[in-house]
Amino acid sequence: MEDAELDKIGANPDSLTDVARQVLGAEMSRRGMHLPEKAPARVEPPSPVMIRRYRDLPEASIAKSVLDSAGIQNFLVDDNMVRLDWFCSNLAGGIKILVREEDAEEANKLLAQDVLEQFDVEGVGQYDQPRCSYCQSWDVSFDGLDKRLSYGSLGVGVPIPVVNKGWKCHSC
């Protein structure tokens, strides 16, 4: 080979095996040429760690917003699959939330916190979290859809969403 050809091969020594690199280095030094140093090995970023699984998108979105507000980088996996067809949630293993390995412990602590019974709201005063009067569950919502009447109206051919006023417990 000519010197120009060796220079061309030597310009990209990372593409060579260790044996080929040694032979190339020996030949280039015999000819008084210089072989470029091997580039330092690339450090791969750590892979993310799954800390929780959620069946439903709203729960996963709330967990993501809690971690976002704490400044912990995170992302949801399989959320689009569940968004397209919620029936696939169990098939996909639920919606997974992933964080960096060094943030996993802090993220778990944040997501494991209990719901505050009451807290102060600026400009409003003290806010008491609603609870079910029967089972004392925190899993309540306001203005729930009356499924029996709403779905019954579909049988008549006129969909009428009937909404219950007040708190509805999802645990009872």
Image: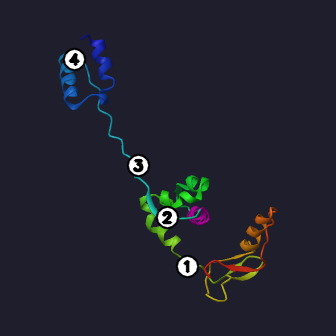
- Mark 1, other Cα within 10 Å: few <14 / some 14–19 / many ≥20: few
Instruction: Tell which tag, 2 or 1, sits nearer the viewer.
Output: 2
- Mark 3, other Cα within 10 Å: few <14 / some 14–19 / many ≥20: few
The label on residue 32 is 4
The label on residue 114 is 1
Identify which amino acid the numbered label 1 is placed on.
Asp
- Cβ–Cβ under 8 Å for marks 2 and 4: no
Does residue 93 appear to the left or right of 148 in the view shown? left
Identify which amino acid the numbered label 2 is placed on.
Arg
Q: Disc 4 and disc 3: Cα gap in Å? A: 39 Å
| Circle 4 SS class | loop
For label 2, the residue is 53
Instruction: Tell which tag, 4 or 1, sits nearer the viewer.
Output: 1
Question: Which color scheme is applied?
Answer: rainbow
| Circle 3 SS class | loop
Q: Residue furthest bottom?
A: 134
